[in-house]
Image: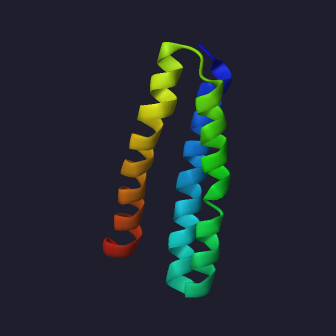
Amino acid sequence: MSVKSILLSLLSLVLFLGFIIGIVFLFKTQFILGFIGIFLEIIPIKIHQKAVDEANGGIDKIFAKYVVPVLALIGIVFIILLFTLWM
């Protein structure tokens, strides 16, 4: 079990959701900056790929490959609904 893989997975999840919040704010204020913010999503994706590569145990492979993307998808849906429909 690799602690580094789990920490990188959590870091990529937090960065990914943080960038999504920023992108939603940018799209609400200035449309062009929202598109520029989409390119920032490359950073958490690269960190997540490194976390998957670092995983060498069963638990961290499952966590990095399946749990983190599912949590990211749930977070994206919640953030977009929160900032666009509910506010």
Residue found at x 37% / y 74%? 84
In the picture as drawn, the residue positioned furthest to the front comes out as 53
Residue 81 horizontal side relative to residue 29, left or right: left
Quarter of the figure that contains the N terminus: top right
Residue found at x 64% / y 20%? 3
Q: Is residue 30 visible?
A: no
The image quadrant that residue 53 belongs to is: top right
Quarter of the figure that contains the C terminus: bottom left
- Residues 20 and 40: in front is 40
In the picture as drawn, the residue positioned furthest to the left comes out as 85
- Residues 68 and 58: in front is 58
| x and y, in percent, of residue 80 in the image | 39, 66
Q: Is residue 64 above or below residue 30?
A: above
Q: Is residue 30 above or below residue 26?
A: below
Q: Is residue 15 above or below residue 67?
A: below
| x and y, in percent, of residue 16 in the image | 56, 52
Residue found at x 44% / y 42%? 69
| x and y, in percent, of residue 62 in the image | 45, 24
Q: How many marks?
A: 0
The image quadrant that residue 51 belongs to is: top right
Residue 4 horizontal side relative to residue 56, left or right: right
Residue 76 horizontal side relative to residue 42, left or right: left
Q: How is the image coloured?
A: rainbow
| x and y, in percent, of residue 56 in the image | 59, 16
Q: Is residue 72 visible?
A: yes
- Residues 14 and 49: in front is 49
